[in-house]
Image (tube, rainbow, N blue to C red):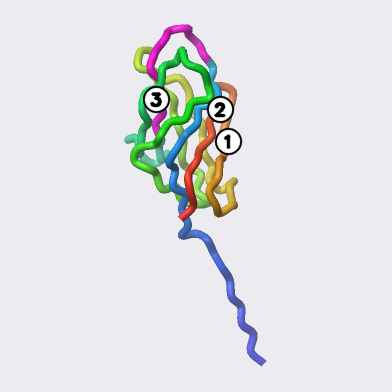
Amino acid sequence: MATLFAGCTRDDISFSLKTIRLNNYERKTTVHQKLHLEVFDDNKSVALASTDLYPSDLTLPASFKVDPAVPMALYKKAYHVQLWGDSTGYIGSCQINMDEYKIVFPIDMEVKNDSLNISIMGSWK
């Protein structure tokens, strides 16, 4: 009698980050400025991607196209998104833990903390 064990792993699947929606952020100043987001792998000090500019005096939520699209490995914890203003500089950051998301289809994942609330959108490959 032979026993066959077959397993399926999804370690090679990655999420392709294409859009970030800025839902809210802690406004420490009323200065009107242009906002943008940058995506980082915690192992690197250089941004993997950034977004276009958005005027801070317009309403939220606002969607930003990520350029280039960022492949994010499933089950990895080391990504974060930073919000920047052109006149005030760094505003806030959110950690993205890909190990919290196990669903494999186009998805909208919300990430937030006390100072920043964003959603990341893209597709699984």
Density class for disc 2 (Cα within 10 Å; few <14, some 14-19, many ≥20) is some
Upstream in sequence: badge 2 or badge 1: 1
> Can residue 34 be found in the magenta stretch?
yes
Marks 2 and 1, Cα distance to the nearest angstrom?
Answer: 7 Å
At label 3, the amino acid type is His
User: What is the magenta range?
Assistant: 27-38
Density class for disc 1 (Cα within 10 Å; few <14, some 14-19, many ≥20) is some
Is 114 displayed left or right of 70 in the figure?
right
Please give the name of the residue rendered at 53% of the width and 21% of the height, measured from the top-left corner: 60
At label 1, the amino acid type is Glu
Please give the name of the residue rendered at 54% of the width and 17% of the height, measured from the top-left corner: 26
Q: Residue furthest bottom?
A: 1
Q: Report helix, strand or loop for mark 1.
A: strand
Q: Residue furthest top?
A: 30
Upstream in sequence: badge 3 or badge 1: 3
> Can residue 60 be found in the magenta stretch?
no
Marks 3 and 1, Cα distance to the nearest angstrom?
Answer: 18 Å
Locate residue 105, reporting x and y percent.
55, 52
Upstream in sequence: badge 2 or badge 3: 3
At label 2, the amino acid type is Asn
Report the residue marked by disc 3.
Answer: 36
Tell me the number on the disc at residue 18: none
Locate residue 79, reporting x and y percent.
46, 40
Of residues 86 and 56, the one nearer the viewer is 56
Q: Are marks 2 and 1 in contact (CB under 8 Å)?
A: yes
Report the residue marked by disc 2.
Answer: 117
Task: Give the number of callouts.
Answer: 3
Locate residue 70, reporting x and y percent.
39, 44
Is 23 displayed left or right of 51 in the figure?
right
Report the residue marked by disc 1.
Answer: 110
Q: Report helix, strand or loop for mark 3.
A: strand
